[in-house]
Image (cartoon, rainbow, N blue to C red):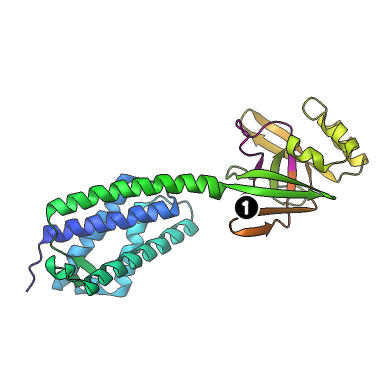
Amino acid sequence: MTIIYIDVLFVVNLLINYILLRACCVLCRLRLNQYRILFGAFVGASYAVLVFFPDFSVIYSTLCKMLISMLLVAVSFPFYSLKGYLKALFVFYMVSFGFGGCVLGTFYFSDVGASLGAVYSNGILYFNLPWTILALSGTLFYVATKLFAFFSKRSFKVNGLRKKLYLSFGDKTAEITALMDTGNSLVDPLTLSPVIVAEYRLLKNLFSEDIRISLDKLENGNLMWIMDDIVQKGLSARLIPFSSLGKSNGMLIGFIPDRAEIRDECGVRVLDKCVVGICDGQLSKDRSYGALLNPYM
């Protein structure tokens, strides 16, 4: 007969819930709030303790377990949409199932469960883990999580946010490194198509010489005059209003490329409906990118 210590049961499940919630936070790239995650882990650990009391058999049901898990995710992270909450809940379930499978697999193929006095009841894990091992495990997990988050963030910035953008106009194509900018919500007021903002220096070779002569005056010229001039020269263009820091009523000249596509490790994705806004300035100080993608594409 295995003796179950309430304090060990609580602390072990507190640590496990904390691990699962931190993993969920990293995978969903949610804003980390240690106090909320600890509170969520506390809720899960409290439920684990109650499960081992026969008088609370009503909470063994699948429905109750689902409600507890939904509550645990809701109190652990800040959400601004139902979609974000459901995504985090799904990831939490996947992480939990993966963790549970690893634990059960370890217990099945080895005698580690018996040596630790492991008990698995009603979906709750208990094992009599020494405090020194518990403290060491928690420290190692914290370090591993920080390292994973750091390298995941770097990889996401390099590979996830920056894309190779190819814009074709006539018989010419421009290759531009573009940044997926969550702050770029520009749309063309005529077609409501999302807008890509790109530096003129990277686009100028797409246009004929007479159109370039007009667009070369973007920095100091009259925007309306330039707009009328390039339209008369055959470029189908439009004005796109925008607001940014230091410029509340700005305007960009935009045009529709013949073809726009993104190429990355996932393959080639054609952007069917988009407008390219021509920026006369420099978007990146170090010129690591020359265009801003609209995330709603």
Please state the horizontal and vertical placement of residue 143, each as a whole percent of the image: 30, 46
Please give the range of residues in magenta.
277-292
Whether residue 31 appears in this view of the structure is no
Q: Quadrant of the C terminus?
A: bottom right
Identify the residue at image location x=18%, y=53%. 134
Say left or right for 28 vs 289: left
The vertical placement of 38 against 87, above or below, is: above
Q: Residue furthest front?
A: 110
Whether residue 80 appears in this view of the structure is yes
**Mark 1 — residue?**
296
Q: How many labels sit on residues? A: 1
Identify the residue at image location x=9%, y=62%. 5
Residue 244: which quarter of the image? top right
The vertical placement of 290 against 265, above or below, is: above
Please state the horizontal and vertical placement of residue 142, each as a whole percent of the image: 29, 47
The vertical placement of 85 against 174, above or below, is: below
Say left or right for 213 vs 57: right
Q: Nearer the viewer, residue 256 or 289?
A: 289
Please state the horizontal and vertical placement of residue 171, each as a whole percent of the image: 84, 50
- State the predominant SS element of the stretch in magenta: loop
Mark 1 falls on what kind of element?
loop
Q: Quadrant of the N terminus?
A: bottom left
Q: Nearer the viewer, residue 159 or 88?
A: 159
Three-letter amino acid code at the position of disc 1: Tyr
Please state the horizontal and vertical placement of residue 54, each as a whole percent of the image: 14, 73
Say left or right for 259 vs 3: right
Q: Nearer the viewer, residue 92 or 136?
A: 136
The vertical placement of 250 against 111, above or below, is: above
